[in-house]
Amino acid sequence: MQNSLLGLYQAPEKSWRLSIAPMLDVTDRHCRYFHRLLAPKALLYTEMVTTGALIYGDVPRHLMFNQEEYPVALQLGGSEPEALVHCAKLGQEWGYDEINLNCGCPSERVQKGAFGACLMAEADLVADCIKAMQDAVTVPVTVKHRLGLDYDESYAFVRDFVAKIYDVGCRVFVSHARNAVLKGLSPKDNREIPPLRYEVVAQLKKDFPDALFILNGGIHQLEQAKDLLADFDGIMIGRAAWHEPYLLRDISQAIWPEVAVADNKEVMLKMTAYAEKALSEGAPLRAVIKPMLGLMNGQQGARHFRRLLSDVKRLNAGDITLIEEAFLPFC
């Protein structure tokens, strides 16, 4: 049963207290390596990978990751149990610590594939998918979901959705505390316009006391994060990890004060070495640099820092010395 696997998440090396959200076109392996420097014990997620991409596409391109990323979870997008089982097995074979099913993405492209947030209307199918994956792999199988669809804010809807999945043994729910509006709002709008309802996730936690509920949505300040950690099993940081990545370092130090995090000089040295390795493997320098652009936001000199790291000619030339040049004033 999935319940027996909860110890994996409560172990120090795989703590659920802090995780970084799966974000399309953001949380690739270069971004995850950078985030690991700032939050040594956080749980990192891949971008959502569709079952079709793994079944018909380039598996190594989608599943390759750095050993330094552990613990790292694979998020899948799909709605067919057999396809999800195949991909969950691949995820386990490649060494991922967890398989997560996306039931929260509201984009039209995902809706056309009949998965993501629209799966919340098909709780029985989601339960079948989760059960099939649980039977096929030994790593935890979890769900990331919204609180409702469109403008229906009925608590009964999300409670019944969670209950169906809980009944097949799932005990870890990553709850984005907003509804998903499937028509009329862009993915960006869906992250901002539907109201946050943390109290609904708190009620789920009361109604399913032996499950873990990880709160996602609207968390962008240290004090806010600390307050929420008092009420939930963990928090998941989304776009703030992209726009203000230094927040990860602050939250990590608040949760695990005994665990050292990389200061700016160490980030500079390790990202320079990482960039050299990535370039030797054929990765473009801009992909390595991109996650670091917001690290100095709010500090004097942040604009110059971003400008240096965004120099098109030097990026195209693979000039990794721009990392040291940008970081030195902050070291």
Image: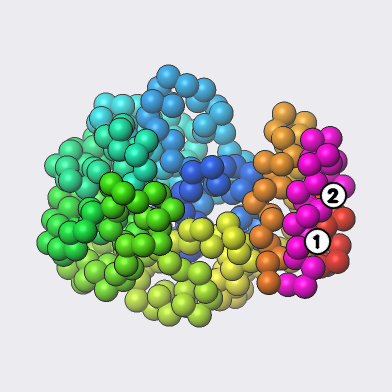
In the visual, does 248 lie left or right of 185? Answer: right
The label number, if any, that marks residue 134 in the structure image? none
The residue at 56%/60% (across/down) is 241
Element at label 2 = helix
Pointers 2 and 1 in contact (C-beta within 8 Å): no
- Where residue 123 appears, x then y in whole percent? 17, 45
Q: Quadrant of residue 292?
A: bottom right
* Figure check: 88 above or below 157: above
Q: Is residue 140 visible?
A: no
Give above or below for 22 relative to 192.
above
Lateral position of residue 181 relative to residue 61, left or right: left
Quadrant of the rendered image containing residue 155: bottom left
Coordinates of residue 217 in the picture (x, y in percent) = 40, 63
Quarter of the image where the C terminus is located: bottom right
Q: Is residue 41 above or below residue 102?
A: below
Q: Nearer the viewer, residue 311 or 52?
A: 311
* Residue identified by numbered label 1: 304
Is residue 264 found left or right of 248 in the rendered image? right
Q: Residue at x 44, y 26 (%)?
A: 54
Question: Which amino acid, mark 2?
Answer: Leu
Q: Which residues are magenta?
A: 299-322
Residue at (14, 57) in percent of width and height? 157
Residue 204 in view in this figure = yes
Residue furthest toward the front? 184
Q: Kindly identify the amino acid type of the residue bearing the numbered disc 1.
A: His
- Label 2 CA crowd tier, 10 Å (few <14, some 14–19, many 20+): some
Mark 1, residues whose alpha carbon is within 10 Å: few (<14), some, or many (≥20)?
Answer: few
For disc 2, the marked residue is 322
Identify the main secondary structure in magenta. Answer: helix
- On the image, the x and y values in percent for residue 203 come to 21, 71
Question: Is 19 a magenta residue?
Answer: no
Q: Residue at x 61, y 55 (%)?
A: 35
